[in-house]
Amino acid sequence: MEVRIFGGIGEIGGNKVLVSSPDRLAIMLDFGKSFSREEAFFQHPFMSPMFPEDYFKTGLLPPSQGPEWRMEGYDITGLLISHAHLDHWGYLPLVHREIAVHLGEASKVILEAYRSMGFKDLSALEEFEMHTFKTGDVLDMEDLKVLPIHVDHSVPGAYGFLIECCSKKVAYTGDLRMHGPRSDMTLDFLDMLAEEGVDLLLMEATKVAPENDPEASLVKVLENRIWYRWKREPPKRVNFEVSSEREVGERMMEILEDSSRLVLVEVSPTDVDRVRTVCKVAERMGRELVVDERIGFMAEALSGAGISGLPSPGDYLLWRRKRRKGGEEVKLGAREPKPLVEFIERVEDKKGSGSVIWGDLRGEILKDENSYFVITSNATRFLYEIPLGVKPRIDFVMSRSEPFSEESALSMDRLMNWLLIYGVHRYYRIHVSGHLSPKQIADALERVNPTRIVPIHTEHPDLFDLYVPKGMRDRILLPEVGEPVNI
Ligand SMILES: [Zn+2]
């Protein structure tokens, strides 16, 4: 069996792992967008990759047989997506339509919800042959046998894979964590690997880094930039170290409890544990909940797939994205995706008129600043949508659980400037990462005891040996991008 890694080496995300049999029948594990590599060659939105060849010449995609990606030199029998984070599936629209896509049920629901919300890259989603899998399934992919096994991560429906061929076994962790409410699922995965015996383990090592919080140093740079450019004191970021999802809620409650301001919290719409945590805080504070349309729509889509405890229409007021026709703001744009329009109508049905906030209503609710608790997927956008002449006092919490990327750091720059407009001089970061800590990585390796280990999804593979149990250090392999590893 051969493994070649085309993304996720020396970078967080962009995972693309080709696993093939001696007959060159192959599968691809994940097909993630590489934020750092895109940043290196392109500048959004002025110079974005436009044609497939732009992706090939920059190495964003592995070599292909044609403009729609199909691995050169191999016969690809399927693409498996571990979970619905962009850095694991983002280049899917560039894949040849004849390649079947395999993913968990929740991942499929999330991708479809993104498409319904008008993500233009996903307009072609229905052209793919999609198969969903669950734990316990055995996928028979020509020469390769694949077992998807659930893991806990900051998005529902995350999986790791165990692949068998020619009596050898390769395992791929995807992204995983141990501190979440479903750490039992991560343990199931690790136990399965220990039981089966693994010849090569592709281990996510996001948190292997010289400093604990790589984001902190970048935020510092951005703060200095604001200072030099605008001669203004940037808003201070107060970071709270927490180590579990439960602690996120406790700390948030402590900080916000006595707030007399408008509470604004940014979360990722697919991080259902965080959405639940934040909703609970709003409820305990006795505030009326306001969610933006991405949070509301995604919550409803995932509830439909059997994920419980998420807010549904009737529970909240819906903050509608600003849409304009001529000089006027309109409630519904002419070319809105139909599922989104239907969703907005449902909110109005359940909660009555005035439950969809747009136009003048924005100013109305913001006057009553200590009555509301806003959960947004994009705080910068929320602040930009506040009408002229309304200046709510705001307590802002950043509580995202997405992989850190430079792109998000750049948007942090804009966020800070918007916060200053509304007089926010300090904000809180309360967050626990969706990944294993270095100590948990060591424990996992101990448990699985693989013959060979490749660290992926980390910017510092060269530091990986520092965190590996002593007797295992000589098992580490650090292949180059695309270099074949034979098992
Ligand atoms: Zn992830």
Image (cartoon, grey):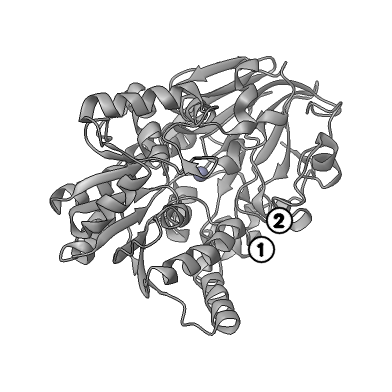
In the image, what residue occupies the spot 86% across and 26% down?
Answer: 66
Is any atom of residue 353 visible in this view? Answer: yes
**Is 57 located above or below residue 342 in the figure?**
below
Give the residue type that dot 1 points to: Asp
Q: Quadrant of residue 312?
A: top left
- Establish if 68 lies above or below 481: above
Q: Amino acid at mark 2?
A: Glu
Task: Label 2: state its secondary structure.
Answer: helix
CB at disc 2 and ligand 1 closer than 8 Å: no
Q: In the picture, which quadrant includes the C terminus?
A: top right
- Looking at the picture, how far across and down is residue 132, in whole percent? 50, 18
The residue that disc 2 covers is 39
Residue 27 located left or right of residue 186: right
Label 2 and label 1: CA atoms lie apart by 22 Å
Near-viewer residue (186 or 118)? 118
Mark 2, residues whose alpha carbon is within 10 Å: few (<14), some, or many (≥20)? Answer: some
